[in-house]
Image: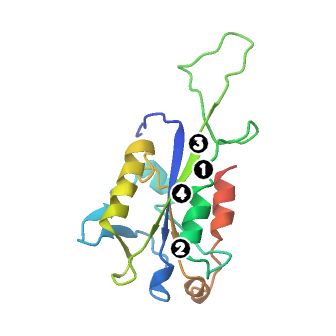
Amino acid sequence: MTFFEKTDVDITIVIDARAYKNALKPHLFPSVTDKEGRLVYGITSVAKEYCFKQGMVKYVILSNNEEEFEKLKDRLEKQSVLPASDDAHYISGGDEEKQPSGEQPQPEKKKKKKIVVPADEKKFEDATVVVSQEDAKRMEEADKEADSMKKGEVIIIVDSRVAGKEGRRLPTLEEVLLASNK
């Protein structure tokens, strides 16, 4: 089992791949590269226990498929919040942190952040999303800070027309983010 360092933040990486229109379809083992072809995220980036439990990425659509990238980015990155006391997103205290008898351990609250990056619409390969070198660095920094990629905390937004062609409805981004807050 892989052990991760405790942090006070959870960072979700959101990649807006709507620019690919009808080309990008959900894949089991997608990858993310920068424009130079360097692998930023792939099957070897995710810890095995997270990959088996939840997969490498969550594919979603937007409620408003026409929302501009900058508005989406502002909306999501400004949602960084500290959960309320009744939220379930806590670092759980293990056996090593025994509390005095009769006292319940107090969970640590985690700040939830989102990093939103656009896919490069001019570069496309099957099952590979291409991002700029600057965005690749942001993703790698998020992984260093909160093990985001190692934990599979990656969401890819696809064009809603692609989701319809697949014959099943993908969840919306809002549905996935709401579920991750529970």
Q: CA distance from mark 4 to mark 3?
A: 21 Å
Q: How much space separates mark 2 and mark 3, taking CA atoms?
A: 24 Å
Marks 4,2: beta carbons within 8 A: no
Q: Earlier in the sequence, mark 4 or mark 2?
A: 4
Mark 2 or mark 1, which has the lower sequence index?
Answer: 2
The x, y position of residue 156, in whole percent, is 50, 69
Is 77 positioned to the left or the right of 86 in the image?
left
The answer to whether any part of residue 48 appears in the image is yes
- The image's mark for residue 111 is 3
Report the Cα–Cα distance between label 1 and label 3.
7 Å
- Mark 1 or mark 3, earlier in chain: 1
| Residue indicated by mark 1 | 80
Q: Amino acid at mark 4?
A: Gln
Answer few, some or many: residues within 10 Å of disc 3's Cα (few below 14, many 20 plus, some between 14 and 19).
some
Report which quarter residue 40 is drawn in. bottom left
Q: Nearer the viewer, residue 123 or 89?
A: 123
Judged by depth in the image, the label closer to the viewer, 1 or 4, is: 1
Say which quadrant the N terminus sits in: top left
User: In screen coordinates, is 68 left or right of 139?
Assistant: right
Q: How far across and down, in percent of the image, does residue 126 sit?
A: 36, 81
Q: Residues within 10 Å of mark 1 (few under 14, many from 20)?
A: some
Element type where label 1 sits in the image = loop
Tell me the mark number nearer the camera, choosing from 2 and 3: 2
Residue holding disc 2:
69
Q: Are marks 1 and 3 in contact (CB under 8 Å)?
A: yes
- Callout 2 touching callout 3 (CB < 8 Å): no
Mark number displayed over residue 54: 4
